[in-house]
Amino acid sequence: MRVLSVAFPSMPVGTALGGGAEQILSIVEQGIVERGYQSVVVACKGSRVAGDLIESTSLEDHRHTIRHVLTSYPVDLIHFHGLDFHQYLPDWEMAMLATLHLPITFYPESIFESGRRRNLTLNCVSRSQADSTPPSRDLPVVRNGILTESYAPAEPNGFLLWLGRICPEKGVHIALEVAHRLNAEIIIAGPVHPYPEHLDYFSRQIKPLLDSRRTYIGPVELKEKRSLLSRAQCVLVPSLVAETSSLVAMEALSSGTPVIAFRTGALPEIVDDGETGFLVDSAEQMSQAVLRIDHLSRAHCRQRAVARFDSSRMIDAYLALYERIITRHLANACAPQENL
């Protein structure tokens, strides 16, 4: 089996690069190769893959590059990961899968219509995402996973940690407010992308809350991220949107670090309330939960994460889904066509 994985045109693929969708693509693609299958990836320059990388420079170039790959390689299935996948679907009768990494409302309604291409399968990354709107409720669910062996517990240093993209919907200001309320040290780590709304949010709502004990250290490399996750007292996830998943929460738990998260989206599917962290509904409740974090076992957090979030489960699930999609496509292709 040869799989063509197609990334979002402007984000590099790699376990330490891009966003969540790019990290998942990287992990799945590496698993495909490790299990003896063939892999081709269409992604932007700077991507790191286990199979063959075919670089693309733009959305328009994506269309041409995908066609080039299909004429150069015997591909059995295309797996799309980008939000805009519907803009570069090739006009080929072959098995295709698109993973919906973002909230269902981010995608055009047309991709869910009954008349959409029968050779295209959609899948969700959490049960809450699949249940969020009627068009997605019958879609298969393959839950995200991470390389749990890449994370390890360490002695906590007592600081709180927020990690991710600096933008309004991630609730960074709430994490800082919690730290001020408790007079606690917090480290904020992650990129501020050059979008006007994100830059304005950082300038108006984040920067005024920073001081000697509430610090912003910018984007971090993978090695530093692992160190921060393992040494934090806990990780705060005060997301203001229904998260479809949370790789940061999985990574924290794999590091033995409890997570305190808002009770939104898929976060209740990741955090076991009262066991591996706490689910809360406000900044005040988050502050109270921080004071109870030492009652939780970091060893138990690590054990639960390895059992539930290891990437091998996700890779096996995708390979099984690939086989079903390819088999169904071949059966449909061989079925006699009705005369109209």
Image: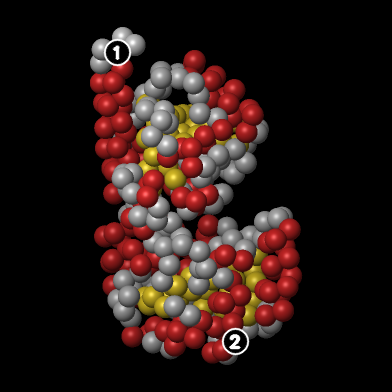
* In this picture, residue 304 sits left or right of residue 280: left
Q: Residues within 10 Å of mark 1 (few under 14, many from 20)?
A: few
Label total for image: 2
Q: Position of residue 251 (x, y in %)?
A: 42, 62
Q: Quadrant of residue 170?
A: bottom right
Mark 1: which secondary structure? loop
x 41%, y 19%: residue: 93
Dot 2: what SS? Answer: helix
Q: Amino acid at mark 1?
A: Gln
- Residue at 49% x, 16% y: name it: 72
* Nearer to us in this view, 1 or 193: 193
Residue type at numbered disc 2 = His
| x, y percent for residue 153 | 39, 70
Question: Which residue lies under the disc numbered 1?
Answer: 337
The answer to whether residue 291 is above or below residue 161 is below
Residue pointed to by mark 2: 180
Residue at x-position 31% and y-position 79%: 274
Q: How many neighbours does mark 2 have within 10 angstroms: few (below 14), some (14-19), or many (20 or more)?
A: some
Q: Is residue 315 above or below residue 5?
A: below
Which residue is more in the foreground, 256 or 324? 324
